[in-house]
Image (cartoon, grey):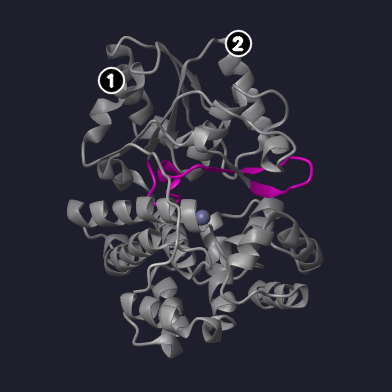
């Protein structure tokens, strides 16, 4: 392996293991006495995790309020509302409890509580922020890897731009990654978040800016998901297998922190920003179409990924990926997910607006006409 110049900086404190949720109270109490839990409306209530988190925090001597409005594909307006409540209550620590959308929402609330003005001003670089409230993340899905990076993906209510806030201040002071919490995920959710994690690893590995350290993380993430996601999806009750896919998801999140994402995420964000579709399903619709057009630009890398997913070389990569998706009941197209043919022009234009860097990181840099063609094919109707 040729070792090129690189810079690698990611100060995240990962606390990993079954049962580790128990340390939530003491970790949060290090940073202050007034805590706001950011969570969604349903799943952490139904599973009992919210009550458990509250009692762990209170036992550690903190005062807790709950903001339960984080929604899938979180919007800037929700973030601003949460930040307003946090400021008014004098909150000192934010705890993000839930899946990727919730963690991203909590990161952005921690940021917006310390920086004046609309959060999208910082996303588009009109202003620069310096700090955020200390943040503790407790993921309940193994997909986004948000617990291991400095991104918070948000959607602007007005423009429908879906784009990441990217700031080191929103790297968690502690991410408590407890594979036991993943077991309450519905099967359908596991498939889509697991595929998202795989995409993070594949895209980071294929990125033009992938460093040697990231390559190790990304390849190991692909291997672990390739070997474990389908058995777990099919009902394998083995905590070791859950640990492996959970770990792979964190590796994916850490990988994109350095290498960024590439065309699949770059083209998916306009679709889910506009039509509020499930991120992993949008990726499932787009990835095979994009990769079929990309293999000749990085055949050796595609050969590696193919082997890690059970194929033989680059020539069977797309069919290997497609059968992987089939086994997760995740073969879909954009039309099924709610995208209309009339959306293609907007999505194409928006992809170059919100995802230019991701498009440029991809092994094959697509033109506007090629992107339009990809959307057309991925629409599938
Ligand atoms: Zn993703």
Quadrant in which the C terminus is drawn: bottom right
Residue 129 on the magenta span: no
Looking at marks 1 and 2 on the same chain, the residue that comes earlier in the sequence is marked by 1
Visible in this render: residue 134?
yes
The N terminus is located in which quarter? bottom left
**The quadrant where residue 228 appears:** bottom left
The spot of residue 155 in percent (x, y) is 67, 44
Q: Residue at x 79, y 41 (%)?
A: 158
Q: Specify the quadrant of the image occupied by residue 190.
A: bottom left
- Please name the residue that numbered disc 2 is placed on: 88
Mark 1: give few (<14), some (14-19) or many (20+) Cα within 10 Å. Answer: some
Label drawn at residue 254 = none
Q: Is residue 223 above or below residue 190?
A: below
Residue lying at 58% horizontally and 66% vertically, measured from the top left:
361
Indicate left or right for 213 with 231 as reference.
right
Q: Is residue 147 above or below residue 210?
A: above
Magenta residue span: 140-163
- The answer, for residue 337, to whether it is visible in the render is no
Picture quarter containing residue 69? top right
Q: Position of residue 367 (x, y in %)?
A: 73, 75
Q: Give x and y (percent) for residue 245.
A: 30, 56
Q: Nearer the viewer, residue 346 or 124?
A: 124
- Front residue (pair 244, 72): 244
Residue topped by disc 1? 26
Picture layout, residue 58 above or below residue 246: above
């Amino acid at each position: 392996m040729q070792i090129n110049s690189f810079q690698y900086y990611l100060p995240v404190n990962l606390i990993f293991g079954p049962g580790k949720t128990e340390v939530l109270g003491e970790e949060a109490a290090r940073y202050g006495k007034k805590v706001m839990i950011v969570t969604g409306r349903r799943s952490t209530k139904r599973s009992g995790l919210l009550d458990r988190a509250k009692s762990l925090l209170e036992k550690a001597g903190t005062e807790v309020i709950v903001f339960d409005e984080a929604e899938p594909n979180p919007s800037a307006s929700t973030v601003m509302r949460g930040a307003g409540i946090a400021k008014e209550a004098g909150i000192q620590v934010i705890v993000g409890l839930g899946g990727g959308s919730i963690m991203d929402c909590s990161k952005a609330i921690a940021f917006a509580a310390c920086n004046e003005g609309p959060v999208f001003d910082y996303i588009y670089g009109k202003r620069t922020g310096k700090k955020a409230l200390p943040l503790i993340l407790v993921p309940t899905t193994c997909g986004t890897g948000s617990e291991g990076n400095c991104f918070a993906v948000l959607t602007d209510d007005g423009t429908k731009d879906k784009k990441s806030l990217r700031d080191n201040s929103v790297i968690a002071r502690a991410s408590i990654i407890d594979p036991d919490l993943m077991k309450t995920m519905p099967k359908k959710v596991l498939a889509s978040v697991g595929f998202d994690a795989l995409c993070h690893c594949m895209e980071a590995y294929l990125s033009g800016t992938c460093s040697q350290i990231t390559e190790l993380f990304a390849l190991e993430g692909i291997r672990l998901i390739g070997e474990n996601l389908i058995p777990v999806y099919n009902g394998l009750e083995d905590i070791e297998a859950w640990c492996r896919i959970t770990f792979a998801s964190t590796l994916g999140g850490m990988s994109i922190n350095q290498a960024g994402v590439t065309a699949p995420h770059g083209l998916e964000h306009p679709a889910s920003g506009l039509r509020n579709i499930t991120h992993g399903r949008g990726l499932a619709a787009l990835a095979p179409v994009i990769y079929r057009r990309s293999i000749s630009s990085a055949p050796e890398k595609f050969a590696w990924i193919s082997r890690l997913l059970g194929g033989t070389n680059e020539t069977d990569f797309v069919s290997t990926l497609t059968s992987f998706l089939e086994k997760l009941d995740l073969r879909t197209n954009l039309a099924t997910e709610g995208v209309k043919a009339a959306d293609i022009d907007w999505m194409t234009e928006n992809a170059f607006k919100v995802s230019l860097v991701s498009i440029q990181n991809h092994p094959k840099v697509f033109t506007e006409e090629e992107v339009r063609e990809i959307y057309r094919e991925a629409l599938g109707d």
